[in-house]
Image (cartoon, rainbow, N blue to C red):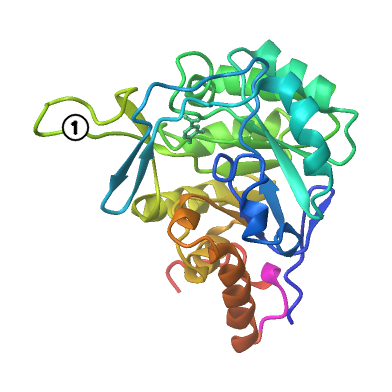
Amino acid sequence: MIDLGVNIGSVHFKNPILLASGIIGFGEEYQEIIDFENLGGIVTKSISLNPRAGNKPPRIVETPCGMLNSIGLENPGLEKFLNEKVDFLKTIKTNVVVSVAGSSIDDFVEIAKVLEPIEEFKILELNISCPNVKEGGILFGKNPDLTRSVVRRVREVSTKNLWVKLTPNVTNIGNIASIAEEAGADAIALINTFEGMAIDINTFKPKLGNVIGGLSGPAIKPMAIKRVWEVFQTVKIPIVGMGGIFSWKDVVEFLIAGAQIVQIGSSIFNDPLLPIKAITGLSDFLRSHNYSSISEIVGKTKINE
Ligand code: DHB
């Protein structure tokens, strides 16, 4: 087997395949399908300071090439997370990235402070890009000043690796990525979902209870690749790529565009074993092209050659 290992900041990943936030909750059910030990890591559903019941249904709409969702950051809140989820997460034999959401900068800071002593968690992913909540969420990631402040303030209280997850719903994602880098991010995670909407032609009503939602799935992959490629040219810190990965070939494409590591999201609803197939496919690809490590293809897009 080729060594698929990769280091991001001070953390080692045995391979570059992670499960994205919001796809498997906290992993209790999905562990029956996949042994997490085989993966580079998993990312939890975003945790907020207080519990959130989420948005009114319907929360998910299928589209021809992807999924529109408006969950509304449903999660048990920090206290229940500590009491009911952390013990299980500590038993997982791979990296567990804790996704953090907040309606204010103080929320992010408070959560980071509380998580600081838990040594098993080496990485926080700051979700400043959720499209489905009224306060915080995407508003942070669309605003350069708020992006700077939230990353800086969390950096002051946290020694963990900080990944900042960006929204593609901005004019210049490279600019926001640079700001996050300057403010102390260890990696840029991109992209979160694209804002979208669907209307029932019989009732004229929006199909989602929250009217708008976030689009994921194969439809968004070319747009994600473009943004990863753009951000790769803008920042020096590593990129965590995601958006519509549907096969191992998509993983290779993200790496060539500039991601060092990727997250698989809604496509596991189509194929729950995709993460494992992606690891095998990536490994076979590297071997058949005589590459000995991932670093030989990361960011190697050939323009005008
Ligand atoms: C939700 C959060 C996200 O960050 C996202 O991309 C899509 C949905 C949510 O919980 O509503």
- Quarter of the image that includes the N terminus: bottom right
**Residue occupying the point 45% across, 74% down:** 305
Q: Position of residue 240 (x, y in %)?
A: 62, 49
| Nearer the observer, 235 or 149 | 149
Mark 1 residue element: loop
**In this figure, what is the number of numbered marks?**
1
| Nearer the observer, 93 or 255 | 93
User: Seen in the image, is 192 located left or right of residue 81?
Assistant: left
Q: Position of residue 279 (x, y in %)?
A: 63, 70
Q: Is residue 211 above or below residue 44?
A: above
| Nearer the observer, 164 or 275 | 275
What's under tag 1, amino acid-wise?
A: Ile
| Nearer the observer, 179 or 56 | 56
The residue indicated by pointer 1 is 199
Q: Position of residue 188 (x, y in %)?
A: 63, 42
**Residue occupying the point 61% across, 68% down:** 276
Q: Which residues are magenta?
A: 291-295
